[in-house]
């Protein structure tokens, strides 16, 4: 008995009547019904979301932006959603009505845009009141669990779009503010530069002023020293005049001794006349020096003003005002009064010198004529008294002049000290103002000043700093195409599993023959393989031609499906042949284990660790991976190792079937009457 005869015998038995033929036809269609119909139902669910009713509530009252424009972000978002037509948006007046509709199932979910939505969006323009805008979403998993996930993606997309738009506008305003700051800092830098130039001019003028005040202070000190000498001379004059008055009084009292004393008187009068002449010379010299010092001080002030006018610190009008103030102060200054008084006293001293000379002449005449001399002595005594009184008055005036000159010298020194401080401060101010101008200019260069194109680009980058560049090495065309590898593989396993319900893994006639065990095993497997090949071929044709799977490698996909059918049919036939009816339960358990470990929906790495071992051992996970590479056009280097693995699973199934044949050749009571038959 050959292998082909055994297979043909089983196929002939299964097609010997109308009902067996229909059974085989139905079993052949099982993978098609399971895989193709399921994929057809779920081919493009995301493309039909517009059939889902969703409540849209717009309560946004709008807001005024920083530039005065009116923002109606809520209405714009709602219009964008309706125009996008992702869901069937139904406008609803109030949030309570929308929530009730979601609770009753009238609406799949509700999206509510609150009244302050636009107000919150423009709030970043104020540092004190910035707040987030909210989109309120109401979902109900009783309507559909996956719908909540889809809605989350939608709201995330809306959030990203609105956030990017608002962020771009806010960033644009921020960059515009930087430009304004830059412009103002440039203006401030120019102003600081002009200030630095002006302060530098002030510094130069303060240097010239300090030079002038130094000269004034020195002249005032010289004037004070001369005034001291004049005061001392006046005191000496007072003392001499007192002595002269006292002497003449004595002379008058002793006119009896006039003959003897006349010569002495003449000699004394000559001395007095000489002393008065000397005193008069000193007084006239001091008066001339006072006048020279006064004129020299005014000349120094005029020269200082001229230098300040030349350096640009003072105008001609300001210089004239300063000179007028100086003349006014000089006119009312005690020193000026003392000088005037001294000049008056100098005239009196001149008179005194002349009088002394006259006394000398008179004394000489007195010596010549006693009677006349006595009368002259009397007159001289009166003149001496007047001289003493005048000298005392002169000494008092000179003390006032000394005090005034001392005050003038002290004021000149304070003025010079102030001018020195002004010079130092002006130098510091000049250096500081120049540093200020340089630093402001440097700071202005560091403040961004983008043009409109740069602001537009920077605003987009700031609002959305991260962009994602997706490079898809292999991509499923639709949701159904994404599920196809898993459900095609699953449908193939279920279809072959259903064959075991009607087809015998091993025939009793073959077991009773003397054929080799491996021939009987292969002969029992070939009918399963033949039907599973038809199942795989029909399933491949329908999903590619009818559903539009558009596999990247359709022929290789079909051949790979045949390899999977070969491995699945060998495993299922071998397990049931070896274990009998309990083997069907084992096949079902293996189906469940492969459902959760093959990575058909979520990556198999996300399953619990024990299921990782199941994924590595059982074939469905490898078939799903291989189908993905063939359908999506990914790298095919793993196909050959996978096919070799499927050949190994086929060999394992045939080995179990061969072992079952060997056991089946020995009949037992359980063989004749099994404990359970399914």
Image: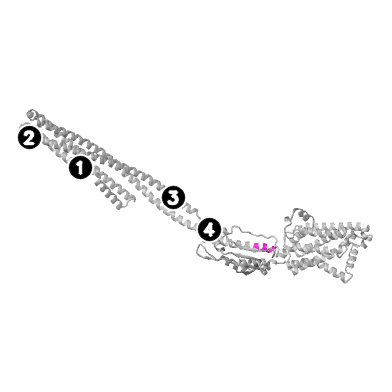
Residue 32 in the image: state x and y as whole percent: 79, 67
Distance from Cα at disc 1 to Cα at disc 4 = 81 Å
Q: On the picture, is 297 further left or further right than 625?
A: left
Percent of width and height locating residue 232: 22, 35
Callout 4: SS: loop
Which mark lies nearer to you, 4 or 2?
A: 4
Magenta highlight on residue 446: no
Task: Count residues near mark 4 (Cα–Cα under 10 Å), then give few for <14, some for 14-19, many for 20+.
Answer: few
Give me the disc on residue 129.
Answer: 4
Which residue was labeled with disc 2?
375
Span of residues in magenta:
145-153
- Residue 112 rendering spot, x and y as whole percentages: 61, 65
- Secondary structure at badge 3 equals helix
Which residue, given by chain and number where applicable, does mark 3 sit on?
A: 436
Q: Quadrant of the N terminus?
A: bottom right
For the residues bearing labels 2 and 1, Cβ distance under 8 angstroms: no
Task: Classify residue 604 as left or right of residue 389.
Answer: right
* Residue 17 lies in quadrant: bottom right
Residue 50: which quarter of the image?
Answer: bottom right
Is the image coloured rainbow, by chain, by secondary structure, or in one colour?
one colour
Q: Earlier in the sequence, mark 4 or mark 2?
A: 4
Give the overall secondary structure of the magenta segment.
Answer: helix
């Amino acid at each position: 008995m050959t292998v082909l005869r055994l297979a043909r015998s089983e196929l002939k038995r299964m097609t010997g009547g109308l009902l067996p033929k229909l059974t085989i036809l139905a079993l052949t269609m099982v993978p098609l019904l399971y895989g193709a119909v399921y994929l057809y139902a779920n081919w493009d669910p995301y493309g039909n979301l517009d059939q889902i009713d969703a409540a849209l509530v717009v309560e946004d009252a709008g807001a005024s932006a920083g530039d005065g424009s009116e923002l109606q972000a809520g209405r714009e978002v709602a219009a964008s959603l309706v125009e996008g037509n992702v869901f069937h948006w139904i406008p609803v007046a109030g949030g309570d009505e929308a929530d009730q509709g979601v609770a009753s199932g009238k609406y799949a979910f509700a999206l509510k845009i609150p009244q302050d939505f636009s107000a919150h969006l423009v709030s970043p323009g104020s540092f004190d009141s910035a707040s987030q805008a909210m989109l309120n979403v109401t979902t109900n998993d009783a309507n559909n669990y996956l719908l909540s996930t889809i809605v989350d993606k939608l709201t995330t997309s809306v959030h990203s779009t609105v956030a990017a738009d608002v962020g771009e506008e806010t960033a644009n305003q921020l960059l515009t503010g930087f430009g304004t700051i830059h412009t103002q800092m440039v203006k401030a830098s120019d102003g600081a530069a002009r200030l630095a130039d002006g302060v530098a001019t002030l510094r130069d003028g303060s240097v010239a002023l300090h030079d002038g005040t130094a000269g004034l202070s020195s002249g005032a000190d010289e004037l004070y020293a001369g005034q001291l000498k004049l005061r001392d001379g006046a005191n000496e004059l007072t003392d001499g005049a007192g002595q002269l008055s006292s002497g003449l009084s004595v002379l008058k009292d002793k006119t009896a001794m006039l003959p003897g004393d006349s010569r002495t008187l003449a000699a004394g009068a000559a001395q007095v006349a000489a002393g008065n002449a000397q005193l008069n010379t000193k007084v006239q010299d001091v008066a001339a020096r006072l006048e020279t010092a006064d004129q020299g001080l005014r000349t120094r002030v005029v020269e200082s003003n001229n230098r300040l006018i030349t350096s640009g610190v003072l105008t001609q009008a300001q210089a004239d005002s300063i000179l007028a103030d100086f003349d006014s102060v000089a006119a009312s200054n005690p020193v000026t009064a003392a000088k005037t008084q001294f000049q008056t006293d100098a005239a009196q001293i001149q008179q005194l010198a002349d009088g002394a000379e006259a006394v000398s002449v008179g004394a000489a005449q007195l010596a010549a004529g006693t009677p006349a001399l006595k009368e002259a002595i009397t007159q001289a005594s009166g003149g001496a008294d007047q001289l003493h009184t005048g000298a005392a008055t002169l000494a008092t005036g000179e003390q006032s002049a000394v005090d005034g000159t001392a005050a003038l010298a002290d004021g000149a020194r304070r003025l010079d000290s102030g001018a020195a401080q002004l010079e130092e401060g002006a130098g510091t101010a000049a250096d500081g103002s120049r540093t200020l101008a340089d630093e402001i200019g440097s700071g202005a260069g560091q403040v961004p000043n983008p043009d409109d194109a740069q602001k537009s680009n920077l605003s987009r980058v700031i609002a959305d700093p991260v962009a994602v560049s997706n490079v898809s090495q292999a991509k499923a065309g639709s949701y159904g195409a994404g599920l196809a590898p898993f459900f095609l593989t699953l449908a193939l396993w279920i279809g072959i599993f259903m064959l075991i319900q009607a087809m015998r893994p091993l025939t009793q006639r073959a077991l009773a023959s003397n054929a080799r065990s491996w021939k009987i095993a292969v002969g029992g497997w070939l009918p399963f393989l033949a039907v599973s090949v038809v199942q795989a071929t029909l399933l491949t044709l329908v999903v590619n031609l009818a559903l539009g799977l558009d596999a990247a490698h359709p022929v290789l996909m079909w051949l790979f499906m045949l390899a999977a059918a070969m491995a699945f049919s060998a495993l299922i036939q071998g397990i049931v042949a070896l274990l009998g009816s309990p083997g069907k339960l084992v096949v079902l358990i293996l189906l469940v284990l492969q459902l959760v470990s093959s990575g058909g929906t979520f990556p198999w790495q996300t399953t619990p660790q024990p299921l990782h071992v199941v994924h590595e051992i059982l074939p469905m996970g490898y078939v799903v991976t291989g189908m993905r590479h063939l359908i999506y056009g990914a790298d095919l280097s793993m196909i050959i190792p996978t096919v070799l693995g499927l050949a190994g699973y086929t060999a394992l199934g045939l080995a179990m079937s061969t072992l079952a044949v060997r056991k089946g050749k020995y009949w037992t009571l359980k063989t004749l009457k099994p404990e359970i038959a399914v």
